[in-house]
Image (tube, rainbow, N blue to C red):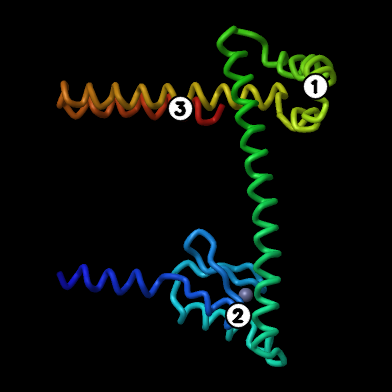
């Protein structure tokens, strides 16, 4: 009971207070306090932590600002940061899509036993046919998908390595439950280590 009460108080204390924005030029992003002046974040949402950051780094920032001016300035900075975040999220999503597309091509190249160098050829054909004829506005995005021989080899090696390691771990676990001898455990562990090293360094 006491524990629950304490936890509730703790959570309430860590909720972002909107007054902190004009007071200390802080906003909240993903349950973290973020400084609107230097974009540094405070992991634990406590007023004490925010005060410490503000006093240490921006102590004189708003000396000449009236209360209404602080509010206006804080709102402007908050909107600016929100715009920057939006651009960042968009860019991260585009990067993820590009990596995903690269893995997809690597998967099909491995599945159909094609050459790693076919990746560049696929890229050229796709750019000339699909992008130019159907969706020219996506051309640039497709150009950013890495399909070089080296990248495809790395992606295929990584995927095969992860699958094999996962399968081998299952095998080791199974053998360990059947054979309890120390030598058997050592042997299976050694096999797993060898395969992990081999494909991890691919
Ligand atoms: Zn700051």
Which quadrant would the N terminus be assigned to in this image? bottom left
Q: Residue at x 58, y 74 (%)?
A: 26
Mark 2 vs 3: CB contact within 8 A: no
Name the quadrant containing residue 62.
bottom right
Q: Give the quadrant of ligand 1.
A: bottom right
Q: Residues within 10 Å of mark 2 (few under 14, many from 20)?
A: some
Alpha-carbon span between mark 3 and mark 1: 33 Å
Q: Seen in the image, is 171 located left or right of residue 110? A: left
Q: Nearer the viewer, mark 3 or mark 1?
A: 1
Residue of label 3: 162
Q: Camera-side residue: 74 or 51? A: 74
Q: Secondary structure at mark 3?
A: helix
In this picture, is 91 found above or below 24?
above
Residue of label 2: 22
Residue of label 1: 131
Q: Position of residue 36 (x, y in %)?
A: 64, 71
Q: Residues within 10 Å of mark 3 (few under 14, many from 20)?
A: some
Q: Earlier in the sequence, mark 3 or mark 1?
A: 1
Q: Identify the residue at the far front of this view.
A: 68
Name the quadrant containing residue 106.
top right
Q: Position of residue 18 (x, y in %)?
A: 52, 74
Q: Earlier in the sequence, mark 2 or mark 3?
A: 2
Q: Position of residue 71 (x, y in %)?
A: 65, 80
Q: Nearer the viewer, mark 2 or mark 3?
A: 2
């Amino acid at each position: 009971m006491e524990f629950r009460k304490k936890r509730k108080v703790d959570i309430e204390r860590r909720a972002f207070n909107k007054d902190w924005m004009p007071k200390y030029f802080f906003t909240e992003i993903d349950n973290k306090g973020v400084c609107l002046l230097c974009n540094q974040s405070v992991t634990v949402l406590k007023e004490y932590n925010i005060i410490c950051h503000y006093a240490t780094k921006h102590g004189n920032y708003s000396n000449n600002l009236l209360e209404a001016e602080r509010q206006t300035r804080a709102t402007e900075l908050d909107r600016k940061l929100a715009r920057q975040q939006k651009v960042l999220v968009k860019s991260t999503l585009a990067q993820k899509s590009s990596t995903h597309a690269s893995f997809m091509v690597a998967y099909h190249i491995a599945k159909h036993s094609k050459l790693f160098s076919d990746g560049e050829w696929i890229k050229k054909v796709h750019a000339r046919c699909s992008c130019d004829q159907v969706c020219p506005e996506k051309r640039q995005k497709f150009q950013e998908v890495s399909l070089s021989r080296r990248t495809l080899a790395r992606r295929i090696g990584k995927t095969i390595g992860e699958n094999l390691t996962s399968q081998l771990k299952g095998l080791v676990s199974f053998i360990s439950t059947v054979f309890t001898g120390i030598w058997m455990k050592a042997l299976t562990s050694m096999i797993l280590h060898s395969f992990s090293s081999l494909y991890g360094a691919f």
